Amino acid sequence: MTKVIAEAKVIGQRVLSRDVRQIDFLVPSIAKHALPGQFVNVQTSRHTAPLLRRPFGVANVDRENGVLTIIYRILGEGTQLLAEACSGDRVSIIGPLGKGFDLKAKKPLLVGGGLGLAPLVYLAQCFCPEPVSILMGGRTETELFWQQLFQDLCEAIHVTTDDGSLGAKGTVMAMLPELLQKGGYDRVYVCGPEPMMRAVAAEAARNGVPCQISLEKYMACGIGACLSCSCGGVHKRLKVCTDGPVFWAQEVTEW
Ligand SMILES: Cc1cc2nc3c(=O)[nH]c(=O)nc-3n(C[C@H](O)[C@H](O)[C@H](O)COP(=O)(O)OP(=O)(O)OC[C@H]3O[C@@H](n4cnc5c(N)ncnc54)[C@H](O)[C@@H]3O)c2cc1C
Ligand code: FES
């Protein structure tokens, strides 16, 4: 795998919601190799704190122009600093890291919730022009600005909200069983909160559809050296940063 450490130039920030931003970096050396499901490790400050880089899934790539995009929620110090970055600023990025999604599906169903939808944008783009469907879940209508990001990439967008303010009421599980029974999907790709991924993986298994999950663990090094991201696998302990973050659902026994 080709991973590099590069000085990326910020070329734009876009406000997607109150606390979610999209940031575009000019970083051809990483953009040309990044695959859907992989992540990058971003140094959010030029100073000593915060010391650790922050991991973010690759949300889009424009190979021709060398642009890599991430979509992030402002949570703490690192993401607040990232939100303050301006066009022209330089940010150190290591990537692409980890193993991405299997791309052999003929009829994929993408399932996402929260910031788990970020890497699915790039996944949907890589399947285009193959028909892709997405099932997305959020708490309320205001969280589902994501629809705009998928509208040119997906032939079908199914939406659920906990309060019923948009789409079907409930979690993605309100729609998934019927979609799997009637849709003829040959792969499910899920990224989102862990309870959602567990429920989706179990439903996919019940319907005999292979399912990939994208795990998020606290990461210190991001390159397989510190073991902070380990989880249980069928045959051995797995490192989310190098063995994943994407796994076949049945590979992981303890998340
Ligand atoms: C493989 C992977 C891909 C991710 N992709 C995205 C993405 O596309 N968009 C997005 O918004 N977020 C993503 N995250 C989560 C993102 O890394 C954290 O939100 C970010 O590191 C928070 O940093 P902070 O300094 O703002 O917050 P902090 O104040 O450091 O912490 C806020 C919260 O973030 C968690 N966190 C902090 N540092 C890390 C770290 N190094 N690794 C994992 N979790 C951490 C903490 O447990 C805490 O709950 C991803 C995480 C992983 C592991
Ligand atoms: S983050 Fe260090 S081993 Fe995965």
Image (tube, rainbow, N blue to C red):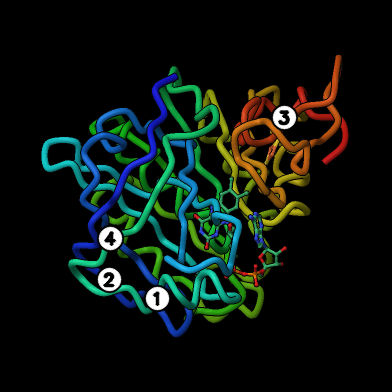
The spot of residue 98 in percent (x, y) is 54, 31
The residue pinned by badge 3 equals 249
The residue pinned by badge 2 equals 13
Residue type at the position of mark 2: Gln
Vertical position of residue 228 compared to residue 15: above or below: above
Query: Which corner quadrant holds the C terminus?
Result: top right
Residue type at the position of mark 1: Ala
> What is the total number of numbered labels drawn onto the structure image?
4
Gap in angstroms between the C-alphas marked 3 and 4:
37 Å
The spot of residue 17 in percent (x, y) is 41, 80
For ligand 2, which image quadrant applies? top right
In the image, 83 versus 111, the foreground residue is 83
Q: Secondary structure at mark 2?
A: strand
The circle on residue 83 is 1
Of the residues tagged 3 and 4, which is closer to the observer? 4
Gap in angstroms between the C-alphas marked 1 and 3:
33 Å
The spot of residue 244 in percent (x, y) is 63, 30
Which of the two labelled residues, at mark 4 and mark 1, occupies the earlier sequence position?
A: 1
Q: Secondary structure at mark 4?
A: strand
Instruction: Indicate yes or no: mark 4 CB to ligand 1 under 8 Å.
Output: no
